Amino acid sequence: MITPRAFSDKSAVLEFFQSKGILVSPEALESIMKKGMGSLVTRLLSPEIISSGYISENDVMRLVRGEITIDNNIKEINFDEVRTGSSINDFQSLFRNRYEKLKQIIVTSSKIRSASDIKTAKKVGGTVKLVGMVTDIAETRNGHKRLILEDLDESIDAIIMKDNPVKKELILNDEVIGVIGSVSKTGNKPAIFVKEVIRPDIPERAIQSNGKEPVYVASISDIHVGSKTFLKDGFRKMINWIKASDEDVQRLKYLILSGDVIDGIGVYPGQDHDLEYLNPMDQYAILSDYLREIPEDVQVYVMPGNHDTVRLAEPQPLFSNAVRNLFPKNINFLPNPYSLLLEGKRVMVYHGMSLNDMVELVPGANFESIGMAIEAILQRRHLSPVYGGKTPIIPSGTDYHVIEEVPDIFITGHIHSHYVGNYKGVRYVNSSTWQSQTDYQKMMNFAPDPCIMTMFDLNSESVINKKFI
């Protein structure tokens, strides 16, 4: 049984507070032990408690609810920079960068290589090709689809007639598309009547086997260490398997944990009731104890998610030094998102918060069969195609969510379902969770498929799913 490294028994807690001249009520002590607070108890040393020399059960609950002033370290853990330093100019820079990157991808298509800017298309008229960002979508009284497309300088109405098969295609706000059509100058202002829509999309390609011995990269996600619903037995089985001499595991060279590696604290109201250990640092320490058992010749990559102790808004940075220092040397830390190059193959890793938005936007998509949502992301070459939904984004001069290089493997997580697919030669997985069904999932009638490790061979098209439950 792996436990936090500090204050794991009553005597240690009492000895600590007695050394400070503070008495602890029996009820408070029971509450501390029951909630597995670990080193979080040191934050009970508020000026008020030091002055009174006594800790009651109510003091413990006030700390859990965040009503006791704590030190700067916890501010670092929970600090959320969603709006820090953001301005209209920052948002403009973000969308300009998105447009320029995706336009560059689109115009490599032979169909739209000679695209005009919107200002020129308006003047020239006739048949034109242009690239724009969708800023509005509506339907006319006659049943036609009307888009507003913008480039860096101008905008234009784009009309897709109701008898055009393109009208049935899913077009989202904020995505960048190329269009081929005819510009009409009749009426109040020029408009383009769209014949064809060109997306950045993934080019079709086959997965080539190079004849070499298999080299596997394994993917897991959403471990949620610290939660009462963390599936310890399944995770222990997986760690033991990695330490074994199985033929497949001998070929395992990389292991990726794509976010929500701990359950954190303060992520949702009443979360403290669902936690075995309240202190996020103790949760990371437990995960570290598991991962340090993995042989050093396996390179482990750990990415944050929305439950981890970094800012919620994407792109998410590396874990703090305080967290990273808990882990052994063969653990590598990634920001979210990130594109790895392993054995000459590009592996894109993204925790996957935008999948919540895409499930609602893509017809027929759902959490059990998330492939449609993942493929819609790949088709648009953007990890979070629609701004302003459930995925907070930090505006900056670079849009890190654009999929500039086509990945060989695409890894997501977040939604706790397990799904493996292939889109135009890009193998992808929504990685399995290591947490049992939560109360929220019960309410939504969603049952996760937990404790599955997905292994991709970097030298062939082979994919192995190993279940540890």
Image (cartoon, rainbow, N blue to C red):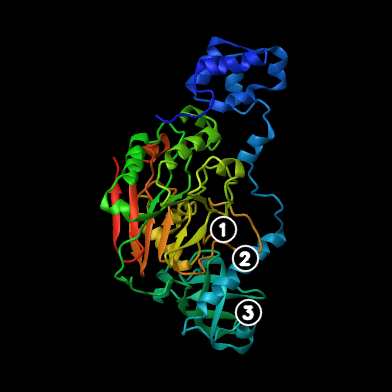
Secondary element at image label 2: helix
Residue 95's disc is: 2
Residue 384 drawn at (x, y percent):
52, 59
Task: Choose the circle earlier in sequence order: 1 or 3.
Answer: 3
Residue linked to disc 3: 189
In the displayed structure, would residue 59 be above or below residue 327? Answer: above
Residue 395 drawn at (x, y percent):
64, 58
**Are there few (<14), some (14-19), or many (20+) residues within 10 Å of tag 1?**
some
Q: Considering depth in this image, is 389 or 188 the residue closer to the camera? A: 389
Q: Considering depth in this image, is 243 or 69 the residue closer to the camera? A: 243
Q: Rounded to the nearest whole Å, what is the CA distance between mark 2 and mark 1?
A: 10 Å
Say which quadrant the C terminus sits in. top left
**Which residue appears at 49% of the width and 25% of the height?**
36
In the displayed structure, would residue 424 be above or below residue 333? Answer: below
Position of residue 249 in the picture relative to residue 406 (left or right)? left
**Which residue appears at 65% of the width and 40% of the height?**
76
Residue 197's disc is: none
Q: Rounded to the nearest whole Å, what is the CA distance between mark 1 and mark 3?
A: 28 Å
Q: Which quadrant of the figure has residue 102?
A: bottom right
Q: Which quadrant of the figure has residue 167?
A: bottom left
Q: Nearer the viewer, mark 1 or mark 3?
A: 1
Asked whether the viewer can see residue 24, the reply is yes
